[in-house]
Amino acid sequence: MVKEDERADDDDDAATLRKREASKIKRAAGRHAKVAAGLAELELWLRDLVRQGLARAPAEPARYSATEYDWRKSEAKMNAVPQFITEIDGLDIHFIHVRSKHENALPVIVTHGWPGSIIEQMKIINPLTNPTAHGGTAADAFDVVLPLMPGYGYSGKPTTTGWDSERIARAWVVLMKRLGHTKFVAQGGDWGAVVGHDGATGDSGIARDPHQHARHLSNRH
């Protein structure tokens, strides 16, 4: 038989539990209301930002691309240097490879950034491969390799995930070995610097490979 004082204790416990649950629900509702208000404010801010951006967006870049940009000029510049496509780890890699006329030139692989491509790096080819024409000596000469990272330009676009900076670095090691470069240095800027840095800290990236003797990284974010 349940005694009266035990029933009273049970009622008190139930009432206390209901109060606690009601308090939790109220606090949760308050948090949800704050989140909803914050999201609404964010949406208004984004809409206003988009309106301002569209209103201020200059038409010049679009006009230049449509009417003045000379792709044939860039095409001719690229076709003036040796370029190739090779498959590495199931993906086509497009690259420029220019050997110096000087003996014992040091091979260098240069990785572009984002957004970017090997087009912006073509200006370094002649000074590096032909330093004597630019105030240097034959000892300053490099064999230059400019690869396009996966998904850029004429390199293949990955259809699966996993092509991170370390995997790209491993692909560059394979590329350099295929080209016969048993010793080489690496340079990268922006995302290319991440490839060099993460490759150095990975299991089999560029800087951990015994064939690579130095690396230069710039503008790494």
Image (cartoon, rainbow, N blue to C red):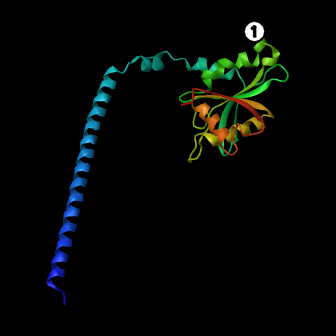
Decide: is 61 above or below 32: above
Residue 46: image location, x then y, percent: 31, 33
Q: Is residue 113 left or right of residue 134?
A: left
Q: Residue at x 29, y 37 (%)?
A: 42
Q: What residue does disc 1 label?
A: 135
Q: Residues within 10 Å of mark 1 (few under 14, many from 20)?
A: few
* Along the line of sight, the residue nearer the viewer: 3 or 114: 3
Q: Residue at x 67, y 38 (%)?
A: 200
Measuring from the top left, give residue 132's x and y in whole percent. Answer: 78, 12
Seen at 63% across and 22% down, the residue is 121
- Taking 51 as reference, is 9 left or right? left
Residue 210 in view, yes or no:
yes
Q: Is residue 204 above or below residue 79?
A: below
Q: Is residue 198 above or below residue 17?
A: above
Q: Is residue 25 left or right of residue 85?
A: left
SS at circle 1: loop
Q: In the rendered view of the protein, which quadrant contains the N terminus?
A: bottom left
Image coordinates for residue 34, horizontal then vertical, percent: 24, 45
Task: Please name the amino acid that badge 1 sits on.
Answer: Gly
Q: Say whether residue 146 is left or right of residue 104.
A: left
Q: Nearer the viewer, residue 86 or 9?
A: 9
Q: Quadrant of residue 218?
A: top right
Q: How many marks?
A: 1
In the picture as drawn, the residue positioned furthest to the bottom comes out as: 1
The quadrant where residue 113 appears: top right
Q: Position of residue 58 (x, y in %)?
A: 38, 18
